[in-house]
Amino acid sequence: AQSVAQPEDQVKVAEGNPLTVKCTYSVSGNPYLFWYVQYPNRGLQFLLKYITGDNLVKGSYGFEAEFNKSQTSFHLKKPSALVSDSALYFCAVRPDTGRRALTFGSGTRLQVQP
Amino acid sequence: DARVTQTPRDKVTEMGQEVTMRCQPILGHNTVFWYRQTMKQGLELLAYFRNRAPLDDSGMPKDRFSAEMPDATLATLKIQPSEPRDSAVYFCASGLVLGTHYEQYFGPGTRLTVT
């Protein structure tokens, strides 16, 4: 069975500073990894995914994530945070074969302070 | 801009009542997912369908929950009878699975409160 860990319930950064939201995963076979963002009273919005290829994946709104197979991690990053980035971020994983549904982490609340 | 739609957006009901939540997937998508989000459990997969057939409903309490796709444009999640512990936000998501990978697009959710 697959699982995702987001070790930080909350991350606080100052506007303009770089941000990192951590994610580690466990899955049988090759992982397909995703990041979603949720704004208050909204559904989840897709940010980016890793399927194969380059370990550094670029996504929406200036976010990127780095796949590290040896550390089974897929941390979300942004070079310069905006106040509008404040939201709940979910990492998700599924294996490349078999069950197609995603397993989500518990979420990390990002707070960007002006 | 195609979107997943869900109705109702908010539902307050009394314990024991039947609740039906509806989802319209993005036109052309062949896979539909139902998730439940609570503070305690986070996001949990309840069930998902491919080409209207249920593939996995292991996350769903079978005694009171049922999920169907009467046609390709409508997915329903029904709770009968509802209980206070069912209070949560229920999300529907759809995707087009043609190979090994795809993206899921989420609806805005139905916030259910059972008193």
Image (cartoon, coloured by chain):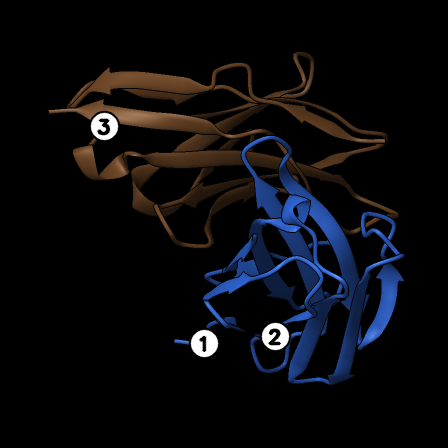
Q: Residues within 10 Å of mark 3 (few under 14, many from 20)?
A: many
Kindly indicate whether the residue at mark 3 contacts the one at mark 2 (C-beta within 8 angstroms).
Answer: no
Q: Quadrant of the N terminus of chain A?
A: top right
Q: Chain of mark 2?
A: B
Which of the two marks, 2 or 3, is nearer to us in this view?
2
How far across and down, in percent of the image, does residue B22 sit? 61, 75
Q: Chain of mark 3?
A: A
Disc 2 secondary structure class:
strand
Q: Which mark is residue B22?
A: 2
Q: Which chain is blue?
A: B
The image quadrant that residue A84 belongs to is: top left
Indicate whether B23 appears above or below A60. Answer: below
Disc 3 secondary structure class:
loop
Q: Nearer the viewer, residue B93 or A61?
A: B93
How far across and down, in percent of the image, does residue B32 sit? 69, 67
Q: Residues within 10 Å of mark 1 (few under 14, many from 20)?
A: few
> Badge 3 is on which residue?
A81
Question: In screen coordinates, is A83 left or right of B98?
Answer: left
What residue is drawn where x is 85% and y is 56%? B57
Indicate whether A19 appears above or below A106. Answer: above
Q: Chain of mark 1?
A: B
Q: Nearer the viewer, residue B89 or B91?
A: B89
Q: Residues within 10 Å of mark 2 (few under 14, many from 20)?
A: many
Q: Which chain is brown?
A: A
> Badge 1 is on which residue?
B2
